[in-house]
Image: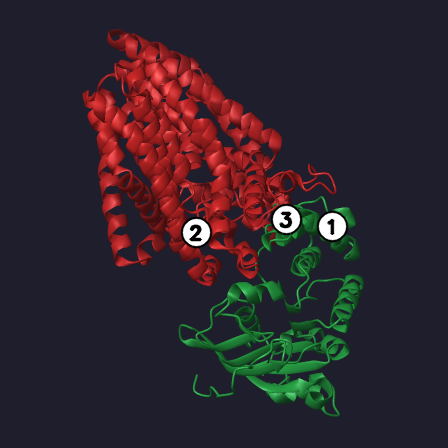
Amino acid sequence: MSDVTDLPAPQGDPTEGPAIALRGLGKRFGDLIAVKGIDLDVPRGSFFGLVGPNGAGKTTTLSMVTGLLRPDAGQAFVLGRDVWADPVATKRLIGVLPDGLKVFDRLTGLQLITYAGLLRGMPRELASERAAELVAALGLTEAQGKLVVDYSAGMTKKVTLASALVHGPRVLVLDEPFEAVDPISAATIRRILAGFVESGGTVVLSSHVMDLVERICTHVAVISDGLVLAAGELDDVRGDRSLEERFVDLVGGSTEVVGLSWLRTSSD
Amino acid sequence: MVAHLVRLKLTLLRNIFRRSRAQAIGAVVGIVYFAVLVAGLAVILASFRGSLDAARVVIPLAGAAGIVLWTVVPLFSFGSDPTLDPGRFATFAVPHRDLTIGLVAAALVGLPAIASMVLSVGVVVAWSHTLASTLVAVVATAIGLLTAITTSRWVSAVMTQAISSRRGRDVIAVLGLLLLVVIGPAISVVANLGASLRDVATTAAVVVGWSPLGWAWAAPGDVAAGDLGTGLVRLALAAGLLVVVFLLWSRVLREEVDNPRAVSRSDSGTSSGDDLGLLARLPGSPLGAVAARVLTYWRRDPRYQISMAMTPVVPLALLIPFVTGDVAWTPLLMGPLVAFLLGWSEHNAVAYESDALWLHVASGTSGRDDRRGRLLPDLLLAAVLVPVYVVVGVAVADRWDLLPTALGLSVCLLGAGYAVSSVMSVVLPYPVAESGESPFNAPPGAAGITIAAQSMASLGTLLLASPTILLAWWAWQGSVAAGWGAGIVGVLLGIVVGIVGVGVGARLYEQRAPELLSALRRS
């Protein structure tokens, strides 16, 4: 964690300043330094895309923002509150969709969303009302009485997203929200998220689908190997090229295919 | 393909020795110990060559018992071998016939099978009176052994499937109860026979010899005694049985490979549409929600059902020594035992949820809500089971003077168990069968930590409850004061220790929730 810079923590009124601020955030797993001291500001009301190759540290970073993984260095602020100094108050503001974690899949879809609301301390009537509304909005009405274990991957994603929305968070942190989701549901989710941003909320999502990020995000950060390579408004980051070209440029990988001649059927 | 599976099994066997040095030494000591034991038994079996009459009684009974052991033991103690779980081969497009034979062949490579083969050699020696009897013995013993192994595979596959459907669970529960009802009287009958044991054994050997379990083991005896016809009939029946069992195994295997997720499907559809189930019936607070969710899981997840089914049944075993012998004190422990089991069984509760716990962490659920919510369903169950078993136990033993003692001891063990469990499920979660896997699966390589953690939980509970245990002991020795003392101290100590322990667990949870989540993800 050599390159931890000394940006000051966001001060004062939580109603101003960035929605999420990371200061020298770092995480080490044994010999592997997954996140090498990230500084990043996510402006309020932005639709923020976090892109990077596999293993870049996206999930690790987002987990440290949402209070699921304790950082080894640095701080994370959400709406001016230190996530790790005051987790209870901060977590109230965040809605979380993690990637690759199980859910309580022996509950029905409707039960799972209501459960998430109740855990947040919502009154039952409000929680179940909102759960029903979310189920309808995400097109899960027919499956609401089925156990989540019997859902497809895309449906599980949607019901988990609904669980992240039920308590009315101010900031949404979504890890790969569109993975395995069909195009129609993806459009629905995009519209829900766009409405959320319009009304003053902030969305941070990770993805490695550049097209999608380019289409829906206002801001973007490229991270690779645990470092932020570029961050800012979408147009500033990509310049006059496509995000994908810029991304390949930044990350520096080669897209040349070496070998695999046996895969070309014409070589028979 | 068959060779592949056998090689896979050999690799797994070799890997027993590739863990830590301590574990390898433990394994070697264990294997040497059992090798000596098995060799001794084989020699004893072989020595029956000297008395054909005795052999015709002992060997069919031993053989039938062997088949039963092969079938039952893996289900209850070690978990069916998950590395050779048929469902795992679903994606590999292995020809059905190869898989059917291969899995049985692989089972022949395990240590239990090797032990059985050594014993079988002893059996063959015992029958080697004439050339014909030796030949029949070789064939029949091989058939018997294969029948045992195939039956074992078949039954664990069927059980895995049955446990996943409500109806199957009901059937198993009824069968289990029947077995329990029968065991007590059966043991007492056998125990009371005493002197006439020899006659009983002889009769039993005749009956068993004509039952499917005994055909293969009795056939060589007939031939050795000169009754070639009967021997061949039994041999034919045994061969037929092997074919039938093999076909049954083959059919179940096909179902399981075609539909490997069947285990994870349970009662989907029982909940109708917009019904919130228990979430609507318990208090609408985080604590109530956690409790309702745990209760829902008890109903829907086979892994919980196993322990739910076992907990009320185990204390009944204490009635056996009482009924069969003159042991007067065991029923008194029924209440304390069920209380101990209920408290202790929560010591790894979080591990069963695996990393779904993230929802609690991300929601900022308080430690108190998490810990208490988890224990509430168990406490509800205890509120029913503990008083019932305490009263029943005291009534059976006819020691109403010890009622306060038994009650105090039970409450104390329950509270101590909750204290230990609240802390241990945060600090030391250990791997369990994954959700959707067969509840009979034991995660490979986790035996050491499992045993260590379970022993720690037991010792911790007993230690916290030790003042009450001592008082209860004095009460049993005859001290009236100690009897009441155990009652009062037990209830107070149980409540205090329980509340303090759950509080400590809650504090630890709040400090370590992210670390707990990481530990659950790794395991």
* Residue at the image point whose x is 55% and y is 71% from the top: A65
Q: Disc 2 sits on a residue from what chain?
A: B
Q: Position of residue B351 (x, y in %)?
A: 46, 50
Tell me the CA gap for discs 1 and 3. Answer: 23 Å
Mark 3: amino acid: Val
Q: Give the number of the disc on residue A129.
A: 1
Q: Disc 1 sits on a residue from what chain?
A: A
Q: Nearer the viewer, residue B5 or A4?
A: A4
Q: Which of B60 and B446 is in front in this view?
A: B446
Q: What element carries label 1?
A: helix
Same chain, labels 3 and 2: no
Mark 2: amino acid: Pro
Answer with left or right where residue A207 lies relative to residue A90.
right
Q: Is residue B269 above or below residue A156?
A: above
The reply to whether callout 2 and callout 1 are in contact (CB within 8 Å) is: no
Chain B drawing hue: red
Characterize the local packing of mark 2: few (<14), some (14-19) or many (20 or more) Cα atoms within 10 angstroms.
many
Q: Which of marks 2 and 1 is in front?
A: 1
Q: What residue is pinned by disc 2?
A: B431
Same chain, labels 2 and 1: no
Chain A drawing hue: green
Answer with left or right where residue B470 lies relative to residue B447.
left
Residue B368 visible, this orientation: yes
Q: Position of residue B426 (x, y in %)?
A: 41, 54
Q: Is mark 2 on a helix, strand or loop?
A: loop
